[in-house]
Amino acid sequence: MLYSQDLKNKASSVISNTNLGWQQTGIICDCLQDRYEIEMKYSKAIEKLATKLAPINEFFSASFGIRAQLSSQFAEEIKGEIDIMKQLIVQQKATQYLDYVKLWDSQLQSIKSNLKAAEGYLKNKKREYEIEGTFELVYSACQPDKLEKQKNKAAACKKEYQQAKGNYLELKSEMEQVLKEQEAEATLDQLQQLSLQRLNAIKDCILKIFVYESSIAKNHLYDLEKMSDRLHDQDQNLFIEEFIKKTKQQETNPIELESFLTKLLDSQGQQQIYTTNIYPIGLEKTEEQIQQETKEIQDQPQKQEEFLNFLSQKFNSSSFQLTLQEFIQCTNISIGILDYCYENKNAILAQQLLQFSFGLFTKDTQTRYMQDMLVNHQIWQHRDYWEAVIINQISKIKKGTKENINTSILSILTQVAQHMLMFKLSPDLVRDIVQKFSQFFKLNKEIADDLIQAINSQV
């Protein structure tokens, strides 16, 4: 009986879930049908737009044409998925598995009900037979005159009892036969398997939609980048000059004739030196030779670029590790270059050295990082230097929405704030610099306050 109840519970669950699945799949198919119609309308509309744009701009026309084609192809794929899901439902209903399960469940309940009634009836007849049989034994010993009548009565009860017993055993056998048959359970499994096929079809369709949406998002991003490149004709230094003008008006300290900011502006538009040569580092050299090398690199911008190429090569390697001889030479040359950057107000070159110093290290008796050897240089204590670094990075932001630009500026402020704290700039100055740029670019006050709070937590 326990097996019967488990099988009935399983049947009820499968019937309920199958009916619900058919209903929900129908709703999904309706939604997909709406999406199909939307995509087809969009494909036709965007194709018309591409035709109109053709005489004006071939790039945009081609881009929209491709988008129209992708949308049409996607719509046809959706149509195919709808047909597959509907066909699976039709096939599942055609098997009549659900009808069989319902019929089997109804028969099982009927047999169980009859068996229960027969069991009660048998108990009553058994009790009557036991009572009348007991009287027969008693009368045979004590009251012979009543024996004949009692024998007849006991025999009638015995016959009714045997008939009830036979009926009960027959129903019990029928029940056992139903439960022994594996057809019902196999049918339930087949019904679940068909439901699984339908669910997998829905899953495949949803995955195709996700892939399509991801592809479209990448196409939009590519188009935006191309649009930005083609429309980016505004002078990038305009907002930098506005910032310099505004901050200089607020400056209370004596005006320096030269600063990192003014040098940064002066360098805009100048042709940059480019070389793939790598400065030879690593050969064993005396202190005098290293000093001579440093002087040579200080005086020649091309040598500076070659030295940076060496650091870049090491920085981009998998280990970031320098030999002890390389570390000594790189540290001394870097300090010399920082002296040159401080004297000539070259913030860009100093920032490049700072970036490389984070990862490069050597192992002797202990691990030593290049950053620790440069952290005490005086250049890092000048507010003007850090402001020039921030301005230089902001000037490289590509045009976009105000929200995207503000996000990029906030990311730059966060990174540079970490560098200022790592190179021992006063926390008060760090907060002041971040607040000034946040106010100037009108960043979200709540996000800017979170950044200030983060700075305070690291002090």
Image: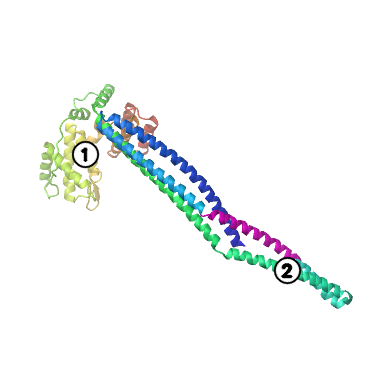
Q: Residue furthest right?
A: 145
Residue 314 magenta: no
Q: Which residues are magenta?
A: 95-124
Mark before the other along the chain sequence, 1 or 2: 2
Q: Position of residue 327 (x, y in %)?
A: 19, 47
Q: In front here: 251 or 179?
A: 179
Q: Are marks 1 and 2 in contact (CB under 8 Å)?
A: no
Q: Note whether 269 is above or below 19 in the view shown.
A: above
Q: Note whether 153 is above or below 99 in the view shown.
A: below
Real-space CA distance between mark 1 and mark 2, rounded to the nearest whole angstrom: 104 Å
Q: In front here: 419 or 70?
A: 70
Q: Is residue 40 left or right of residue 89?
A: left
Residue appearing at x 59%, y 58% in the figure? 104
Dot 1: what SS?
helix
Residue appearing at x 47%, y 53% in the figure? 196
Question: What amino acid does circle 2 point to?
Answer: Gln
Q: Is residue 205 left or right of residue 235?
A: right
Quadrant, the C terminus: top left
Quadrant, the N terminus: bottom right
- According to the picture, the residue beneath numbered tag 2 turns out to be 163
Q: In front here: 140 or 274?
A: 140
Residue appearing at x 60%, y 66% in the figure? 177
Q: In front here: 217 or 289?
A: 217
Instruction: Using the image, tell me which numbered label, if any, was put on residue 352.
Output: 1
Question: What amino acid does circle 1 point to?
Answer: Gln
Residue 108 magenta: yes
Residue appearing at x 28%, y 38% in the figure? 419
Q: Position of residue 202 (x, y in %)?
A: 44, 47
Q: Position of residue 234 (x, y in %)?
A: 24, 26
